[in-house]
Amino acid sequence: MPTEAAITVSQLNRRVKTLLEQGIARLWVEGEISNLSRPASGHIYFSLKDDSAQVSAAWFRQRQRGPAISFKNGDHVLAFGRVSLYEARGNYQLIVEQLEPAGEGVLKRRFEALKKKLLEEGLFDEDRKQVLPTMPARIGVITSPSGAAVRDVLSVLARRFPAVPVVIYPAAVQGDAAPGELMDALNTAVRRDECDVLIIGRGGGSLEDLWAFNDEQLARAIADCPLPIVSAVGHEIDFTIADFVADVRAATPSGAAEIVVPDQHAWQHRVATLALRIGRIGQRAVEDRAQQLDWLGRRLIAASPGANLRRQRDSLRENRGRLEALMQKRILMQQNQLQSARSQLMQVSPALSVQRSIARLSDLRLRLAAGSRKLLSTAGHRVALLGTALNSVSPLATLERGYAIVKDAGTGKVLTRAGDVASGDNIRAQLSEGELVATVKEVINAD
């Protein structure tokens, strides 16, 4: 009897699927397509095989990009994907995510690897690229002498600026020998040193056709070239390693020809503009020199003996006038000082002092009389006010209203309370006019 519980086939296949998917990362598989099937679902099923083995593959419709229908049995391809298991049948298979022809795929990977390598070495850096000359004396073209590219370049150069001569350095641009011939032509151009700028390139083609311009040795030769190089390989959508290492990349050979020379009409217009500017600058220079000559002539005349005598005569007249004005000013100032001294002397004269004293005495006499009258009037008024106030509080005024002042007849003490006397005491009552002497008959106290 088994010591462990048995599992089902589905469970086994599920475990195997998990192991395959987790244990094997995504990878590229190279092989030949066989048993290709295209059901109505849009998915593509096929086998990848080599000389001794094969594996099932499934390329699902949502993963397909580009012209997938172009693949057929017998095609040698590169398939990128993950390994999995079809649980229903227990068959392991490759789930394809990307499919491409084997030859082109290999070239693309080689291209990307070399591009990354040279990029890290700094061969693509902008600071090492040279600037193209504005007006080259001679242009070199490295390409096939029988290709369409050389005709396009010559046609554009003849149209834009036919005065610039062109040197063709022939080389194969396709095939195994092409990289070597291209480097030989480049070395020849450098050694002869007869051109100011080089164009290297060819017309369009497939990746295999353009592969000579992805050669590492050619790329390094272009990067080390002391002459500025314009790369013009293929069409606008084509890129090669030569494009990245060259000083300038042109989309096409015709575009390269337009880059290396200016347009003759624009150049002629610029030359005419410069000529006009030079003429204006020359005219201004002549005018400036004429003005300077006039100024020097005036200076020469001004430095002559006659001019010096005239300046000295004018200076003498000016100094005489200034001296006369100064003397008049001094005389006037002294007259003012004399007048001021006379006025000060008059201020301290005895006669003037006596006159001022007499006038002051008269003024003081008048002020004393007025002040005396005012003082007497004020004093009389105050006496009247005080008399009125005194009369209002005088005992006599009170007595005139019928009141009396009662005193003890013996002591003369003013009596204010009934308890101060006894029955039989004599008292004196002072009236407004006269006094009364009486004897107290009875004492009535206030309570």
Image (cartoon, grey):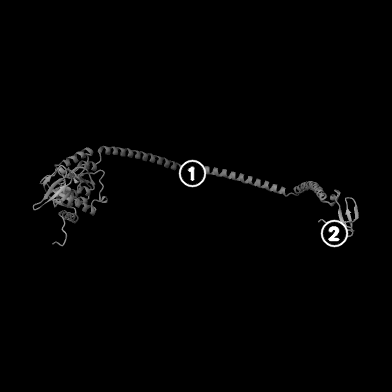
In front: 140, or 222? 222
Q: How many marks?
A: 2
Q: Which residue is mark 1?
A: 308
Q: What amino acid type should be assigned to the residue bearing mark 2?
A: Asp
Q: What whole-number distance in Å separates the C-alpha atoms at marks 1 and 2?
A: 133 Å
Q: What amino acid type should be assigned to the residue bearing mark 1?
A: Asn
Give whichever of discs 1 and 2 has the lower sequence position: 1
| The C terminus - image quarter | bottom right
Counting from the top left corner in percent of width and height, residue 243 is at 21, 47
Are the residues tagged 1 and 2 within 8 Å (C-beta)? no
Helix, strand, or loop for circle 1? helix
Tell me, yes or no, if residue 218 can be seen here.
Answer: no
Q: Badge 2: few (under 14), some or many (20 or more) residues near its Cα, within 10 Å?
A: few
Please name the residue shown 21% across and 52% down the image.
116
Helix, strand, or loop for circle 2? helix
Locate residue 337 relative to residue 278 in the image: left or right: right
Tell me, yes or no, if residue 305 can be seen here.
Answer: yes
Q: Is residue 442 above or below residue 324?
A: below
Point out the frontmost of discs 1 and 2: 2
Q: Which residue is mark 2?
A: 420
In front: 381, or 258? 381
In front: 345, or 321? 345
Quadrant assignment, res 252: top left
Please name the residue shown 16% across and 59% down the image.
5
